[in-house]
Image: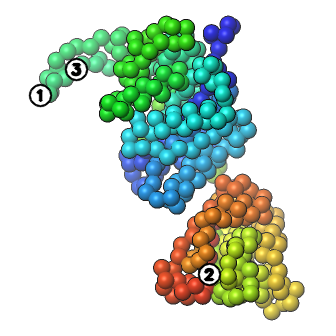
């Protein structure tokens, strides 16, 4: 195969997952639903990373109004993608990009994030003439063969998209509901994703559309408006129209709840028995006093006051310990480590959690996820969150993406709000085979 027929090692992928999933109902984010050992989103990514190498993958997530909510939304998107741990071993860099008010805006933000990444990492990216693959995060049934076919067509034509010929007769209807034109099915295509383009002309086209405030139905329309017959490739040849290649009827998009009932592909065997799932809830509270370190999740947080307790007073690890023990039905932290016993005086709460977690694992349980809340007036917790999550994950031997910790203040009310106490809540999901 000649160089012209090959895609570039600096190709990029955009997974669009910034929508609200409003048609699913019940506040469900469809891309984050469990599927095939991961999530809908991770399944959407898997076929691309199996088909060819990508330098960078940009995933959009719903925009939020404040920094803390945005970080939580970004972390949720990251956990959904890496629910399939194999994706992290693909060799690609992953960017998580806050989306816009429309799909078009979200794609542009992702393209601009990729271009910034190129500037920092691949000085020769423009010379490589890379492709960008734009795919719906809720379209998990894409096959590697379709990815490769779209890439080959885009290399030859500058842009390509899979499409299906409509099964039903298509007619154009006027404003009064009358047929105004009879369309030829052979000349029609219901386009799918991935939509594949040469990267740099597409970015230029998106920016022009933004400047002109033009709203397009998808990226093929943007290409047709601002690239087709207008821009030239690196050989001085004007780019043409988007090439439509045969689509795949299984490459459908999850839109409604009814779509979920048909998750499995026809060739897949019947689903295995569901695992046994238990939840656990933990809580702890300590006074704050001078002369003691403030320990949260095994990390010492700079503070004028720390927890007053028999052990090191780490309220977060104590709440987590109670949560995992409760979910496994193995008791609570007080039954394991009675406060009247001197051997637990000033004990490291990481050691206490590790001992309990060993018993939980011996009973056959694995961690699904852990979600925690710390109620603390000061100091600010956000700068320490990543370190705390990593510390907890290290004790439990899990991925940091399985652990999340939020912080709230007491709004100047009660002992927490007055800075006299800190409390923690923890809920966990434990799983084992049925």
Label 2 secondary element: strand
Which residue is under mark 3?
Answer: 172
Q: What is the x, y in percent for residue 428? A: 64, 65
Which residue is painted at 66% across and 65% down in the image? 384
Drawn side of residue 249 relative to residue 398, left or right = left
Name the quadrant of the C terminus.
Answer: bottom right
Drawn side of residue 354 relative to residue 134, left or right = right
Residue at far left of view:
176
Label 3 secondary element: strand
Which residue is under mark 2?
Answer: 422
Q: What is the x, y in percent for residue 92? A: 68, 35
Which residue is under mark 1?
Answer: 176
Drawn side of residue 280 relative to residue 134, left or right = right
Sort mark 2 into few (<14), some (14-19) or many (20+) by Cα contacts within 10 Å.
many
Above or below, 396 against 153 in this view is below
Drawn side of residue 30 relative to residue 312, left or right = left
- Label 2 and label 1: CA atoms lie apart by 66 Å
- Circles 2 and 1, Cβ within 8 Å, touching? The answer is no
Q: Quadrant of residue 330?
A: bottom right
- Label 1 and label 3: CA atoms lie apart by 12 Å
Q: Nearer the viewer, mark 2 or mark 3?
A: 2
Does label 2 or label 3 sit earlier along the sequence? 3
- Label 2 and label 3: CA atoms lie apart by 65 Å
Q: Nearer the viewer, mark 2 or mark 1?
A: 2
Residue at far right of view:
343
Above or below, 142 against 110 in this view is above
Residue 186 image label: none
Q: Along the line of sight, which residue is nearer the eye, 175 or 375?
A: 375
Which residue is painted at 67% across and 10% down in the image? 3
Q: What is the x, y in percent for residue 291? A: 74, 87
């Amino acid at each position: 195969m000649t160089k012209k027929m090959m895609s570039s090692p600096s190709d990029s992928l955009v997974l669009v997952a910034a929508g609200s999933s409003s048609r699913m109902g019940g506040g469900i984010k469809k891309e984050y639903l469990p599927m095939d050992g991961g999530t809908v989103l991770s399944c959407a990514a898997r076929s691309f990373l199996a088909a060819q190498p990508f330098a960078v993958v940009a995933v959009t997530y719903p925009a939020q109004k404040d920094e803390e909510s945005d970080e939580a939304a970004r972390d949720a998107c990251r956990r959904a993608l890496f629910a399939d741990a194999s994706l992290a071993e693909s060799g690609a860099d992953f960017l998580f990009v806050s989306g816009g008010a429309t799909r078009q805006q979200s794609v542009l933000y992702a393209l601009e994030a990729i271009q910034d990444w190129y500037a920092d990492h691949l000085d020769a990216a423009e010379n490589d003439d890379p492709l960008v693959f734009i795919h719906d995060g809720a379209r998990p049934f894409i096959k590697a063969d379709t990815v490769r076919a779209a890439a080959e067509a885009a290399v030859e034509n500058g842009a390509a998209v899979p499409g299906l010929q409509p099964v039903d007769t298509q007619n154009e209807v006027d404003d009064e509901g009358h047929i105004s034109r009879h369309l030829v099915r052979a000349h029609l295509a219901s386009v799918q994703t991935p939509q594949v383009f040469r990267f740099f002309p597409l970015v230029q086209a998106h920016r022009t559309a933004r400047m002109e405030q033009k709203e397009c139905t998808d990226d093929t329309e943007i290409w047709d408006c601002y690239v087709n017959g207008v821009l030239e490739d690196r050989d001085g040849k004007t780019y043409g129209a988007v090439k439509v290649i045969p689509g795949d009827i299984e490459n459908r998009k999850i839109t409604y709840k009814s779509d979920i009932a048909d998750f499995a592909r026809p060739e897949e065997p019947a689903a295995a028995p569901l695992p046994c799932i238990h939840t656990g809830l933990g809580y702890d509270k300590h006074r704050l006093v001078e002369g003691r370190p403030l320990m949260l999740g095994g990390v010492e947080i700079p503070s004028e006051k720390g927890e007053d307790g028999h052990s090191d007073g780490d309220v977060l690890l104590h709440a987590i310990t109670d949560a995992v023990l409760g979910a496994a039905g193995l008791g609570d932290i007080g039954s394991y480590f009675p406060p009247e016993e001197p051997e637990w005086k000033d004990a490291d709460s990481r050691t206490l959690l590790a001992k309990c977690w060993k018993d939980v694992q011996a009973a056959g349980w694995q961690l699904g996820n852990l979600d925690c809340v710390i109620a603390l007036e000061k100091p600010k917790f956000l700068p320490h969150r990543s370190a705390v999550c990593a510390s907890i994950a290290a004790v439990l031997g899990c991925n940091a993406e399985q652990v999340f910790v939020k912080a709230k203040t007491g709004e100047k009310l009660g002992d927490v709000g007055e800075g006299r106490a800190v409390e923690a809540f923890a809920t966990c999901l434990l799983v084992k085979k049925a």
